[in-house]
Image (cartoon, grey):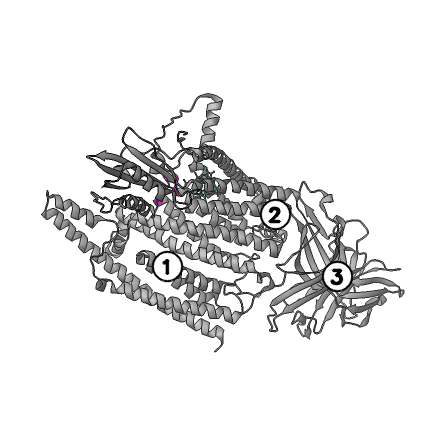
Amino acid sequence: MAVHPPPYRPEGLADDPYDAAEDAPATVTLPRLGWTGSLRWVWRQLTSMRVALMLLMLLAVVAVPGSVFPQRPRDPASVAAYLRDNPSVGPWLDRLGFFDVYASPWFSAVYVLLFVSLIGCIVPRLRVHLRAVRAAPPRTPRNLARMPSHRELTTTASPEAVVDAARTVLVGRFRLLPRFRVVTPDEVAGVRTVSAERGYVRESGNVLFHLALVGLLVSIATGQALHYRGQAIVVEGRGFANAVTDYDTFEAGTAFDPRSLVPFTLRLDRFTATFTADAAARPRDFVADVTVKDAQGEHKETIKVNHPLSAGAANVYLQGNGYAPDVLIRDADGNIAFSGPVPFLPQDAQYRSKGVIKVPDVTSGDQIGLVGFLLPTAVISAQGASSIYPQPDNPMLVLTVWKGDLGLDDGVPQNVYELDARGMTQVLDTDGKPSTLLVAPGQTVDLPDGLGTLTWSGLPRFVALDLRHDPSLPWILGFAVAALGGLVLSLFTPRRRVWLRVTSVDGRRVVAAAALARGDDLGLDAELDRVVAAVAALEPDPHQEGQDDEPR
Amino acid sequence: MSLGELSTLLVWGAATAYAIAFVAFAVDLARLADDRVGERVEAESVAVGTAGASAAAGSTVVAERPMPVPPTGPRRRRAAGIAMATTTAGLALHVAGTVLRGLAAGRVPWANMYEFSLVGSLVAVTTFLVLCRRRDVRFLGSIVIGLALVALGLGLARFYIPAAAVEPALQSYWLVIHVSIAIIATGLLTVSFAASALQLLKDSRDAGSPHLASRHWRPLDALPSTRELEALSFRITAVGFVLWTFTVMAGAMWAEHAWARYWGWDPKEVWSFVVWVVYAAYLHARTTRGWSGRRAAWFVVIGYATVLFNFTGVNLFFHGLHAYSGLTTGTPK
Ligand code: HEM
């Protein structure tokens, strides 16, 4: 049988009598001089319990600013607004990384150090634990009466019978899955001992938990490097293909390979939105009916909020929706200059939506820009036009007209939802107010200044789709489940040792029994009582003496 | 009267019952403290009277045992009896009110801050009553019921909105799982906070702190030892921590389904993470030399403060995706 190994103890782990009972030789390491000596000292400090504790506290503290200041990855507009409103401190905060806390050097430093400490702590523990699992339970301490929980009784049964009875209760019903690991060595001639231990999985769980955290971090980092995310606005009746160029915005990790885009196309057949009937018009349900065409052929699917569609190794999420009025514009010469749906972005709960119709392809003269709002249920009052309900009960387009140079030809990418007014002039009425068009569906109106005509032919809806591929997701889930399992094992497995010593005095057997647990353990006394009761039951009329059950 | 209104009425009834129970628990603690002082004086006089006799040692030991051995008859803890009875009655009203709320809204009743207060306090009180069946922890009553009362009061007075169905982003079975476990964890962490707070107070009084020396603090003497309070707090926190870990994971699953990313450092996510890390630090502190006991108990207090902030502050001060207080009308994304 292997000798019970001395426990590995990270520097600063609190003393528990459980560990002390193993009679581990105290190892005193004096810091050696020189490089290796100091490095070793630093390493021991870094992997100590105290430093782990400090780093954990620090991690909690450095995470907080990310909830206080606007964060660039989540909300760049708010960061810009903050910088505008705080011209003195803003730039400093920016330089120090307060607007992207979770990618800042200081936040990264804390968690990297923590994980280095974690690995330095857990690897030796794992090694020691693997040895401990194979080792025999520790031998019976000399003085059992010193243990926090102990009993003594005498019996006329033979030492063999006592040992067997104890073993039977300790092993439990399933011999292949014993509750306790039990050994029964002879101490000196005539003195039998039983030494049993349970709860090895407590430490296994602890190691599993900590290792799973490492796995989690590695998976997340890998996912960051390999993922891609594309966003596309799709109008009813139209579609898009899974290709980098087909997305409105596309973003990918450093190790992304465009070949990981599995080809498929998706068409939006219909989008249905449901709202409560009251004035608040709270959204109730959004459903996109789509047709996907991929290697398996063509199939109909639905996408809802919370129910992404998986297609081409990616998930497609429904992230937004709105209206895209279908308009046809003829220029001054009567030629069709523009035709098609134009997405208008909702601005409030009633879907007052803002948009721009840019008409660069006029046959002659100025280019045209139409800027304004779509009102699904329009109400015109003295204060202006507004929408009172998000469904298209009384839709109306309210547009102002600009003419000039849209600035689309100089190659600089433009925001399609905004008009670059630099080369444009607003068309005014005779009274000097901006000329405003009110258009109802199906109507054709003349544009002012003889610029042409606008026909509003339909009101399809659009959806904003978010497509994301992250190959690390199953790994992240796996490690998260492992961490949770390890945690449960580690926190709720009782770790106990039970010892018996059987000596013969005057033809009777004196049985001393004791139990020890790691940490607080409410069930310890009951455990010992079960063993003692089994031994006492060997005698029809147990003549017990000095039963001492004073707990601690 | 609609189902929703009936529910609100029942919750008011529960709050009233808890208010009575709170007072009764406080009275009970005060009485218990008086008894303990009397007991100690008696024990001392016995010890002095039979100085040198071996029997004296025994009687002193008995008197100094940490758990109060109540020589006091059942008549003497009548206040505790009243408190337990009103708490149970309050819980019955509380359960009925919560179930009706769910029926009125046609979904699980935990989707906005009013409902979180409602269900969170329900879990705290239930945890307390279940613990009471297993051992005598009635001394926790005044704190747990007090906190439940505050939660219900705040809920009714500040967070209340009429019962209604939820937005598409909240229509998910992950809502049921994530939020229900979060609420249970919060309830448990409330109870463990009560135990740790008492541990700290008692420890200070035992150490002779002048702030806690007055007779108003005498109920602390009636409590179990600081070691037992710490062990109790740890056991409940351990369960709470596991459930919180699960909450964070289930939340990530939900976010992955609803928002196309499992983690985005939204203010709610930041604070859930902070809560988790603080309690992880607590579990470490307990086993770190020089940090167990009193210092570890402070982690529970800080941890609970982060839990409370996560629940109230984050919803009210920051604007994230988790804007579900229901107090402002949301805009569609
Ligand atoms: C990401 C950082 C870490 C987290 C979140 C974390 C979390 C935890 C948690 C929740 C526990 C209690 C549950 C259990 O026993 O499994 C625990 C226990 C433990 N951790 Fe960590 N830990 C971290 C890093 C470390 C490091 C760096 C060390 C080494 C110094 C360490 C050493 C230990 C030890 C020795 C225990 C067991 C204490 C005992 O019960 O004897 N941990 N940890």
Does B56 lie within the magenta span? no
Label whose residue precedes the other's in the sequence (3 or 2): 3
Which mark is drawn over residue A473?
A: 2
Q: Residue furthest bottom?
A: B1
Q: Is residue A202 left or right of residue A476?
A: left
Establish whether labels 1 and 2 are both on one chain. Answer: no
Highlighted range, magenta = B286-294
Q: How far, Cα to Cα, is label 1 from label 2?
A: 39 Å
Which mark is drawn over residue A356?
A: 3
Q: Provide the secondary structure element on which disc 3 rests.
A: strand
Residue type highlighted by circle 1: Val
Label 2 Cα neighbours within 10 Å, binned few <14 / some 14-19 / many ≥20: some
- Residue at x 82%, y 71% (from the top left corner): A444
Q: Is residue A293 left or right of residue B66?
A: right
Does B289 lie within the magenta span? yes
- To which residue does mark 1 refer? B130
Above or below residue B119? Residue B305 is above
